[in-house]
Amino acid sequence: MSPAIHPEPSVKFQVIGDITVVGGMGPVPLASRRQEQLLGLLICWRGRTVPAETLTDALWGERLASRPGKNLQVLVHRLRRTLGHADHIRHDRSGYALLARNAEVDAWHFTDLAERGRRALGRGDAETASALLQEALGLWRGPAYPGLHDISQLAEAAQHLDQERRRVLTDRIDAEMALGGHAEVIPELAALLAEDPLAESSAARLMVAMHRAGQRAGALGVYRRTRSVLAEELGVEPGPLMRELEGAILRGDEDLVPVLLRQVRPVSVVADQTGTGPAPPKHTAPPDHGATGQEGAPAQVPALLPAPIGDLTGRDAELRQITGMLLNPPVVCVVSGMPGVGKTALAVRAAQRMRDRFPDGQLFVNLRGAGTERIEPHQALGRFLRALGVAGTAVPDSLDERAEVFRGLLSDRRVLVVLDDAADEAQVEPLLPAGGGCAVLITSRGRLTALPAANLIALGMLSTGAAIELLSTITGRVELGAGGPDAEELAELCDRLPLALRIAGARLAAGPHWTVSRLISRLAAEHDRLDELTHGALSVRAGLALGYSGLTEPGRSLYRRVGLLETPDFAAWVAAALLDAGTRKAEDVLESLVDAQLVEYAGTDGIGEPRYRIHDLVRLHARERAVADEAPGAADEALTRLTGAYLTLAERAHRLQYGGDYTVLHGRGYRWDFEEPTAARLLADPAGWLRSERLGLVAAVEQAARLGLSDTCWDLAMSTVTLFESQGHFDDWARTSETALATARRMGDPRGEAAMRYSLGTLEIFRQRYATARPHFEAALPIFESAGDLHGQALA
């Protein structure tokens, strides 16, 4: 119930999309993250008094050793001062409450509008219901309580609000259908079904909407696809409602369809008596069972698994592999892969499929290992122990004691533990049960190879066929299902990354007037591609940003600079030049990017050196971060070192191959030197090194040209002729020499111009085009003469 007395003037509190306070004079910035957390908790309790102990536990947990009440008083005082009006936060002997009207808090206002809309829909006033429910949905600017989900109460409140949003969306669609807007709601229903292909209620609504919009074949196609998914995923047939709908549509029984549609309508969630929405979180603790929590602990069965996430197209083999492992506990399974590849979706689907095998419960925690605010093992154990029935007062303080209690509780139980987004082995080792009937399923961007006896599954990109199938499933478009050049191009522009494919598919499903070719044209522009691969709460950029934020500073620097490379793969020595560091140190930093799944191992080259690659979407994000985060000139300096490193190695390779510099010229370009053991190892087979680095050498010439490094550009082009001549790469020879010639002319470098004229003339001789070779030499000779360059004159 909203309090009778409200502070003035009116202040609006927003927790959906961002944490914002808006006063009469505009936004009121909150002074700290702790203030955001406190305000979020007060809003989460919907105007009721929050016990002080509940607030201190949520805000500080076990980290606050003494005077928790005083710390809370200080924080409340500071929040009141920030809000500018002390009466917004009421205090009594039991705790604190936020005083505000429903319309002043977006989360409360959303719930109020949702219930009013449902009541209108229930009494048959579809027009009013549609308006109210649309207004409720209009309050959503992004996820609720963003950035505050490390507090379990706020994470639960955010999840509840998101579930409520989905129900409101469904109710609003029902209202639109009652008003005859069947064709208009088809894209939204298709998107809902794409998010959860097992949701028969969404499938039934979509069948009705398509049938009523004159798309009878499409409606029956929805039935067939849903039936296929249910059979494959759950081994069941569609329920009676969908079967009756299919029969009604086949018979053309128009009277039966609306009757069946009413059966689809879910039971509305009844609001509490205050009219402000669901009750606050329950904080009644189970009985205290002693200091350890083991003796006499209740046989509480936790069920913490989230709902299955999305479609698992192209992951059948991995799903069978994981479920097969979980059949034989004890077992630890690690699923690794880059951001957006579908690790969590696969793990949750496997866990849900196997939950009956673990009758003593299923535990789940998102460890947030990819970001900077990771969940520490002692925090995760505290959650697990409380879920297993240990009273809050009986949860030990130290990590070791918590781990001991956890292992003791699970020693004779069959429990499945899912650890999502783990950072490293140290984060998960205390969370491993010792019971012979338990299994652990871990997802991580790293491979966690140091975890004892772990079964490792590395998730890569989808195959082209699976990527197209996923796009077709999400969009329901015939032209994608049939494959073809457009479907393949769209899949490749998404890097065949499931997250990117879902976003592209959702955009096409939400915009039926969009053609596939139109989306392809928008994605083809590299500087806009990450902007285009955003839809609602889904974002490729956000997933990559999380991994980037979790790197060390050297790792972030290398990530940004690797994005500047223009070759399909590269050797580890490239990292040394980009970082201006020793090879060993650079290799360690590079391996940290591999562990974070931002860079991928690509095999070995012809001289046995490991090669690495970076996917296109990752490259685009790395370049964005380079523009935003590199100090002025740092990126150019890194590329200057890289081109100088190529020049050092190419020059030395030529000398080793020919015994000297008799047929080439050199300039005064910058050279970046390696430690001798590294250079000797790389050039033990000079011709082999040149062959392995052909694409890198060509790219280095072009990068030197863009940087205006004329001496480096033409010297590198000439030193590389060794490779082009012996291997017959005449196109590369012409391309690099012409690029260097243009650069020398642009930068006013006559010796470079003469050297490249000589190089092009030599190329024409190799091609046996003597008439076109002569003008090059005739142009080069007088330039060498005027410069007094006897070596150049002799060559020309």
Image: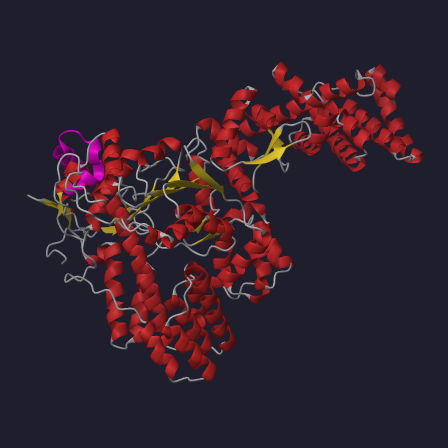
Is residue 425 left or right of 295 when viewed as pictured?
Answer: right
Q: Name the one closer to the observer, 314 or 757.
A: 314
User: Which residue is painted at 44% across and 77% down in the image?
Assistant: 246
Above or below, comparing residue 344 to residue 259 in the picture: above
Return the x and y of residue 239 as percentages of the image width and height: 37, 71
User: Which residue is painted at 20% across and 58% down in the image?
Assistant: 278
Part of the protein shown in magenta: 54-75
Name which quarter of the figure residue 177 lies in: bottom left
Is residue 594 left or right of 290 when viewed as pictured?
Answer: right
User: Which residue is painted at 50% across and 27% down in the image?
Assistant: 589
Return the x and y of residue 78 as percentages of the image width and height: 19, 37
- Look at the image and say whether residue 69 sits in the magenta stretch: yes
Return the x and y of residue 424 as percentages of the image width and height: 40, 33
Return the x and y of residue 652 as percentages of the image width and height: 72, 19
Residue 609 in sight in this render = yes
Above or below, comparing residue 59 to residue 215 in the picture: above
Q: Name the one closer to the observer, 291 or 25.
A: 291
Q: Quadrant of the C terminus?
A: top right
Above or below, comparing residue 463 to residue 446 in the picture: below
